[in-house]
């Protein structure tokens, strides 16, 4: 009996360690819920950024040392990805949103996974 309890405890502990964490691709519904009305914070090409995702499809991107940029965003339900378009862009660009060990990542075919976190509301100015 004691061996059985010890086995269950060890199995539960092993199953919760980071070595066994799985990355999960968020669905379009999860991406929309995560981003809508909130701000993503991370680093892009070595510079800190903040990006707000309005419920009206407007997104505002602010990178340290640069002027803000206004674009549009949406979630494509067929491809299950976040998409954005910026001034001077010809087409929408898509990114998957992945979650791994409690952190979020932008993932595309052309760049490595890029971590970010989400804060509630529009928080474009660092406190």
Image (spheres, rainbow, N blue to C red):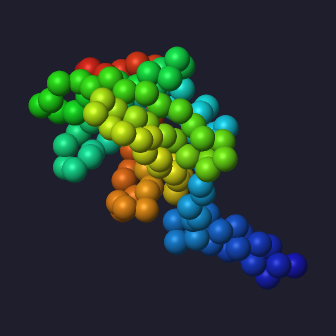
| Of residues 18 and 103, the one drawn nearer to the viewer in this rendering | 103
In this rendering, would 8 be left or right of 71?
right
Rendered residue at 26%/46% (across/down): 44
Quadrant position of residue 6: bottom right
In this rendering, would 90 be left or right of 27?
left
In this rendering, would 97 be left or right of 9?
left
Quadrant showing the C terminus: top left
Q: Can residue 104 be seen in this view?
A: no
In this rendering, would 91 be left or right of 18?
left
Quadrant showing the N terminus: bottom right
Rendered residue at 26%/20% (across/down): 125
Rendered residue at 50%/23% (across/down): 57
Rendered residue at 40%/35% (across/down): 85
Q: Can residue 99 be seen in this view?
A: yes
Check the image and report above or below for 80 versus 60.
Answer: below
List x then y, in percent, for residue 50.
Answer: 31, 31
List x then y, in percent, for residue 77.
Answer: 66, 42
Number of numbered discs overlaid on the protein picture: 0
Quadrant position of residue 42: top left
Check the image and report above or below for 24 versus 9.
Answer: above
- Judged from this view, the residue extending furthest toward the bottom is 3
Check the image and report above or below for 50 versus 113.
Answer: above
List x then y, in percent, for residue 10.
Answer: 68, 74
- Judged from this view, the residue extending furthest toward the left is 65
- Judged from this view, the residue extending furthest toward the front is 90
Check the image and report above or below for 79 versus 2.
Answer: above
List x then y, in percent, for residue 26.
Answer: 61, 48
């Amino acid at each position: 009996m004691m061996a059985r309890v010890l086995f269950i405890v060890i199995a539960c502990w092993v199953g919760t360690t980071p070595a066994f964490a799985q990355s999960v691709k968020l669905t379009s519904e999860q991406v929309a819920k995560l981003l809508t009305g909130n701000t993503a914070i991370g680093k892009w090409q070595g510079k800190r950024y903040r990006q707000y995702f309005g419920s009206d499809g407007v997104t505002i991107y602010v990178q340290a040392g640069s002027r803000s940029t206004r674009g549009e965003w949406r979630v494509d339900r067929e491809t299950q990805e976040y998409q954005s378009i910026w001034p001077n862009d010809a087409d929408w660009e898509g990114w998957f949103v992945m979650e791994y060990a409690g952190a979020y990542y932008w993932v595309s075919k052309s760049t490595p996974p890029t971590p970010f976190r989400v804060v509630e509301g529009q928080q474009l100015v660092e406190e």
